């Protein structure tokens, strides 16, 4: 496997270093070859290369089997001109690679039930994937603008855009508990009526998968009260952005979730969190999101699900032993939290 690692800013280098340690250990345990190239992105790249994402880096990513990104964003960049903002590098990368589907699994392992924002009986059994449309919708719609006290954005979806993300959701569900919940606002929005019609059409091609449509406001409530009822949540760019952060709250920390962005030239894997400047450099970042991104990579791009299973089992064993970073610690824990390095070493061992 040929991998490009883009550590980025803040805790990005800390969590990608951890994930790469785990990945190398997993490959070594099976005697498999792994080729890793590291390049700068974000504010780190502005310092060394004068831009948050260079053409060379895009070419390197396109030529790789997969890309692992840490996070971008730095307090010093706040007043930088738009083309030097670290976030511009990330959006440009997603666009250059053409990724249109975003998978965000959220699982509450038994060892972490106490860390959830929810009561234990509600959190228990949570194991869902948000399949978020990433290439269209409100974030990209034209026209957009801001003029004389009024601002506007356009929400637009084509049948083809909905169809391809719906097929992805059903393929993911076929390998899981075979249930898709399509989330929309079809009682109000034309785009959602189209979304629901296309999702229902695609559902007919997957008779083994149970399908339902749900309005987004009800979905938010269900996610807080009965998250374990969901398997695959299929939804648009905006709703998926919001619901997947809510799912992170159900698990207990943004630091624990990974993601895969697929559909383009090269698949892009990244933890869902940002550069966490408040804890960067303290050695306290949770590497679970980056490690989860690596297991998604092994399953999705790598065709190496048995390696992913090994890693998942190791992480779960560590959690079962009571090991956890600050962000997941609770007053009920028997032992104090551990740092990034210690947690990672335990997973590797
Ligand atoms: P953030 O995700 O960086 O941090 C939010 C909170 O979660 C902070 O309290 C942080 O300490 C905590 N947290 C995040 N990751 C953690 C981890 N691995 N372990 C333990 N705790 C963790 O979001 P925030 O503060 O809104 O943004 C900070 C910077 O990150 C900004 O520059 C923002 O633009 C950027 N950002 C980048 C993203 C990316 O690269 N994909 C995504 C979101 C934000
Ligand atoms: Mg978000």
Image: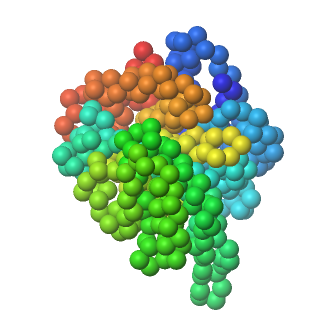
Q: Tell me: residue 23, above or below residue 88.
A: above
Q: Residue at x 36, y 41 (%)?
A: 177
Q: Position of residue 23 (x, y in %)?
A: 54, 23
> Is 206 placed left or right of 40 in the picture?
left
Could you tell me if residue 284 is visible in this image? yes
Residue 285 or residue 230, whichever sits in front: 230
The answer to which quarter of the image holds residue 61 is top right
Q: Tell me: residue 91, above or below residue 293.
A: below
Residue 230 or residue 331, whichever sits in front: 230
Q: Tell me the quarter of the image containing the C terminus.
A: top left
Q: Position of residue 208 (x, y in %)?
A: 41, 45
Q: Tell me: residue 107, above or below residue 157.
A: above
The answer to which quarter of the image holds residue 338 is top left
- The way the protein has been coloured in the rendering is rainbow
Could you tell me if residue 45 is visible in this image? no
Q: Tell me the quarter of the image containing the N terminus.
A: top right
The answer to which quarter of the image holds residue 262 is top right
Residue 248 or residue 131, whichever sits in front: 131
> Is 241 placed left or right of 5 in the picture?
left
Q: Position of residue 15 (x, y in %)?
A: 52, 34
Q: Residue at x 44, y 79 (%)?
A: 188
Q: Residue at x 65, y 35 (%)?
A: 66
Q: Tell me: residue 241, above or below residue 335.
A: below
Q: Position of residue 142 (x, y in %)?
A: 68, 74
Q: Please state the total of marks drawn on the protein image.
A: 0
């Amino acid at each position: 496997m040929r991998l490009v690692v883009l550590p980025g800013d803040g805790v990005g280098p800390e969590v990608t270093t951890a994930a790469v340690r785990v990945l190398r250990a997993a490959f070594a345990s099976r005697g498999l070859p792994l080729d890793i190239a590291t390049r700068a992105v974000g504010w780190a790249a502005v310092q060394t290369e004068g831009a948050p994402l260079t053409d060379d880096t895009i070419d390197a990513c396109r030529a790789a089997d997969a890309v692992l990104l840490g996070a971008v964003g730095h307090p010093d960049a706040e007043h930088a001109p738009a083309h030097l903002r670290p976030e511009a590098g990330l959006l440009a990368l997603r666009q250059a690679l053409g990724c249109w589907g975003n998978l965000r699994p959220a699982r509450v392992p038994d060892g972490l039930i106490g860390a959830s924002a929810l009561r234990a009986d509600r959190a228990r059994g949570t194991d869902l994937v948000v399949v978020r449309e990433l290439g269209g919708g409100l974030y990209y719609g034209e026209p957009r603008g801001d003029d004389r006290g009024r601002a506007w954005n356009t929400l637009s979806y084509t049948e083809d855009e909905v169809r391809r993300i719906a097929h992805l959701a059903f393929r993911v569900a076929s390998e899981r508990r075979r249930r898709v919940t399509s989330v929309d606002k079809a009682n109000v929005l034309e785009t959602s009526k189209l979304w629901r019609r296309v999702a229902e059409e695609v559902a007919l091609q997957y008779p083994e998968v149970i399908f339902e449509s749900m309005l987004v406001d009800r979905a938010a409530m269900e996610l807080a009260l009965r998250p374990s009822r969901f398997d695959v949540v299929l939804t648009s760019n905006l709703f998926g952005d919001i619901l997947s952060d809510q799912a992170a709250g159900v698990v207990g920390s943004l630091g624990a979730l990974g993601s895969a962005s697929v559909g383009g030239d090269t698949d892009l894997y990244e933890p869902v969190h940002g550069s966490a400047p408040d804890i960067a450099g303290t050695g306290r970042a949770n590497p679970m999101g980056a490690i989860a991104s690596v297991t998604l990579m092994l399953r999705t791009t790598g065709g190496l699900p048995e390696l992913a299973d090994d890693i998942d089992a190791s992480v779960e064993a560590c959690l079962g032993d009571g090991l956890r970073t600050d962000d997941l610690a609770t007053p009920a824990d028997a032992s104090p939290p551990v740092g990034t390095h210690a947690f990672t070493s335990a997973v590797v061992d």
